[in-house]
Amino acid sequence: VGYESPADWQDRVHALIETGGAAALYRAADESEVRMLDHNLTDRCIEHIKATKKSGDSLGGAYEVVITGVPPGLGSYVQWDRKLDALLAQAIISIQAQKAVEIGDGLLGSMLPGSQIHDEIYKERDLFRRRTNRAGGIEGGVTNGMPIVIRGYMKPIPTLIKPLETADLNTGEPQPTRYERSDVTSVPAASTVAESVVAVVLANAFLEKFGGDSLSEIKARYSEEVMWRQ
């Protein structure tokens, strides 16, 4: 919200990654009460939350998890239940109140022709790279070395100060719902939960590819992979 296009938002994220890596993203998010990278939007969001609380309503929203430094080749294209994007989507949607999940520019890609959404590949100093990251770091269920980009979409909290209509289980008669909690939105909290479940999925995928009986064995296998890619 507040950006002219998804590309503007991605430019903001990529600029932070280039200048300070994942640590820069963490710092920028944690400096905001609602974990937004743009502090001007933070103020607008807080005002919107306050206004919504005053009206007795609740809010849902979207958040984005970006994972940097992911090696290519994690996941699998062989079986549906081993595809990394499927496992990540399952992890996000299993969080309470999450209703949709997006990998890369998945939603935008459904509305554009292929020539405008697929990532072009070029060669630079014996390395193959992509000019964009609309795939969100995963292709065919396997990581491609680009940052993984996941978005979760959370529904508004259902218990409202301004009650909705429900029905009495005993009589079947209509009656207003009871107010049980004071939250207006839990999207910022959901984003931290999402980071945790994503970390578990990626750790499992990493160990599946490089795992061994000890940490030194895992490091050795990963080092061999890095040397082979170079």
Image (cartoon, rainbow, N blue to C red):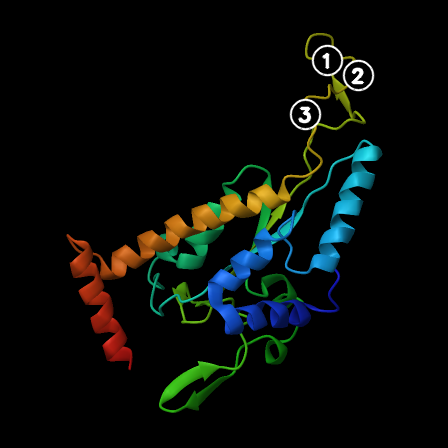
User: Callout 1: 10 Å neighbours few (<14), some, many (20+)?
Assistant: few
Residue for point 68% across, 71% down: 8
Tell me, for residue 181, which label it has, or none: 3
Q: Secondary structure at mark 3?
A: loop
Task: Name the image quarter holding residue 59.
Answer: top right
Residue for point 63% across, 65% down: 110
Most extreme residue toward the top, as rendered?
A: 170
Tell me, for residue 168, which label it has, or none: 1
Tell me, for residue 174, which label it has, or none: 2
17 or 4: which is nearer to us? 17
Establish if 47 lies above or below 205.
above
- Specify the amino acid type for callout 2: Pro
Using residue 219 as the reference point, say whether residue 54 is left or right of it.
right
Residue for point 42% across, 90% down: 124
- Specify the amino acid type for callout 1: Asp
58 or 27: which is nearer to us? 27
